[in-house]
Image (spheres, helix red, strand yellow):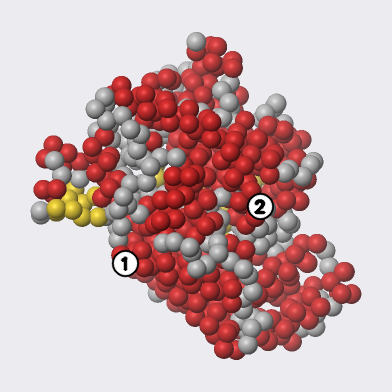
Amino acid sequence: GLFGVPELSCPEGFQEAQDKALQESEQLVQKACSTPPGPETVMIFDQLSDSLCRVADLADFVKVAHPDFAFREAAEEACRNIGTVVEKLNTNVELCQSLRRLLADETVMSSLDPETRRVAELFMFDFEISGIHLDEEKRKKAVDLNVRILDLCNEFLIGTHIPNKIDKHVLPEHIRYNFTAEGNYLQVAGLHADCPDDLVREAAYKIFLHSNAPQLARLEELLASRNSLAQLVGYDTFAHRALQGTMAKNPETVRQFLEKLSEQLSKRTQKDFQMMTKMKMKLNPHNSMLMPWDHPYYSGVLRAERYNIDPGLYCPFFSLGACMEGLNSLFSQLLGISLYAEQTKRGEIWSEDVRKLAVVHETEGLLGYIYCDFFQRPDKPHQDCHFTVRGGRLKENGEYQLPVVVLMLSLPNSARGAPTLLSPGMMENLFHEMGHAMHSMLGRTRYQHVTGTRCPTDFAEVPSILMEYFANDYRVVNQFARHYKTGQPLPKNMVSRLCESKKVCAAADMQLQVFYAVLDQIYHGKHPLKKSTTEILKETQEKVYGLPYVPNTAWQLRFSHLVGYGAKYYSYLMSRAVASMVWKQCFAQNPFDRAMGERYRREMLAHGGGKEPMLMVQGMLQKSPSVEDFVDALVSDLDHDFETFIMDS
């Protein structure tokens, strides 16, 4: 069976696994309600969470990644059913009372360790945001809103990817071949951001981002429903609800962070835009005004011209085997951990190119498993991501339930006889995803509710982004980057040039991220919104980003992150700031420092989400960083390295 779960040797097995989980959960609910308040209450709640998550998490992965449609469909159904049960449990008054009795008992609470207390509070938080404290009518309304929001999220997500069609005669003949033809229509499925023809990019931008009434209605209803739910359960706005328990804590801090960052970036961003405008004038003298469809393209042109970074020159040094060796060597030096390939049993994997790795510590033994689903295949989503399939926890019998995760990448299948070669970007992504996997393996908490990456969103990206700093350090890269034919190491100046090239137009790129984050905060802020989502987009784009809004476009209708990162899009920037500070303070001097590696494990990885994120950061940096510190860390990363600059000059 999939992942060694015996029921899952066929799609119908999902029904069986689900029934078993629901049966188990019913018994646990009864047990929770009849147990006197004490640490056992939290244990039972966590078992309950685990019995449902073991099916739901696995199904979450299978529904997007399994090549067999019947498996995907069965997993989708299981997700929906378990989701409904979870919503019902979150509004089960009797179940909540048993937890409330524990939280109200000061004697028992003061005898609990901090992790158990936090987990009890987190379970209570789940009840409260589902409206448990409301009367029956309002509770029912909260459940209905939750269900409606889930449906709207799915519909909106599908809408963000649907291509737009246009009558082919509208476009000049010489650019039509760039788009897929369908009878008299052309399909525009993306922004064609890398296309050298300005006209193609302009057409793609205006057509792909053209406003669309049904999608607009979905977005407006989604934002309004989220706001209604938040207010129903006692928050001012959806952002206040979403940010509870995060590093930022509240929308005011996020606003301050984004405003200060924007202020610090503005001069550099203007400079970047000027450089892009000059380049555009040089290549296209008739039309030199910089437009939103120009930014990704011309920043790439400037990068290539200034540093001659042809991925083709780098790929031969980054074979997949060499990169995996590099990770193994890094983890072994920093954390005493090695990765071993394991044989899989029949039916355990969903595609024959999936590899299973055992993660083994030099003294603690086996920590868990990582399934590597690295290669492209038809119907597989084109995004790189990390899935928790089973969370770690201390079982009732004293054994530890080992975590199981999947890393999904979209690497090209290699030519016969040649190894898989990664571009620098793919190599960095592999390191990034491996950062999540290590968090999952080392966040060995007692409770699966807070295991590994089950922590606030603005902290979850810290371990993965930190790995990018390792991937861009010559001392690390030099350990594994070898030409697959000659064995020659990657020259140092090639690594330095690659790192410096990433700083070209980096301020403008970051400013674009700030704009998205600000937009997300406004959409999830005070309702009713003062203007339409498109008018807010126009105003915010001109004020925060600086490139003109293009009439009749509605970029927000393609902003798929509004679903998974609602009110939390800033997280990526804040996580990067923390990762940058950890890198500079703890690893920049010696990226293989074992004592630092152990401190990083102890202070930041070991707690999963069982400790307040800011306390973990404090433990690592030995100070509590301010918003200004975050901003300085991000901005100082944009400065060019003087040594490389001199070398290249």
The part of the image, by quadrant, that contains residue 132 is bottom right
| Circle 1 residues within 10 Å: few <14, some 14–19, many ≥20 | few
| Circle 2 residues within 10 Å: few <14, some 14–19, many ≥20 | few
**As drawn, is 7 to the left or to the right of 170?**
right
Residue 361 vertical placement versus 222 (above, below):
above
Give the residue at x 47% y 49%.
540
Give the residue at x 58% y 26%.
639
The percent position of residue 156, horizontal first and vertical second, equals: 39, 64
Q: Disc 1 versus disc 2: distance between alpha carbons?
A: 34 Å
* Residue under pointer 1: 214
**As drawn, is 307 to the left or to the right of 52?**
left
Work out which residue is located at the far bottom of the displayed protein and give it. 136
| Helix, strand or loop for disc 1 | helix
The percent position of residue 166, horizontal first and vertical second, equals: 18, 53
The amino acid sitting under disc 2 is Thr
The percent position of residue 266, horizontal first and vertical second, equals: 53, 35
Which disc, if any, is residue 253? 2
Give the residue at x 69% y 73%.
124
Residue 332 vertical placement versus 49 (above, below):
above
The percent position of residue 493, horizontal first and vertical second, equals: 51, 17
- Of residues 49 and 397, which is closer to you in this image? 49
**As drawn, is 197 to the left or to the right of 629?**
left
- Between disc 1 and disc 2, whose residue precedes? 1
Task: Give the number of callouts.
Answer: 2
Contact, mark 1 vs mark 2 (Cβ under 8 Å): no
The amino acid sitting under disc 1 is Pro
Residue 60 vertical placement versus 42 (above, below):
above
Give the residue at x 58% y 38%.
263
Question: Would you say residue 22 is visible in this rendering?
Answer: no
| Helix, strand or loop for disc 2 | helix
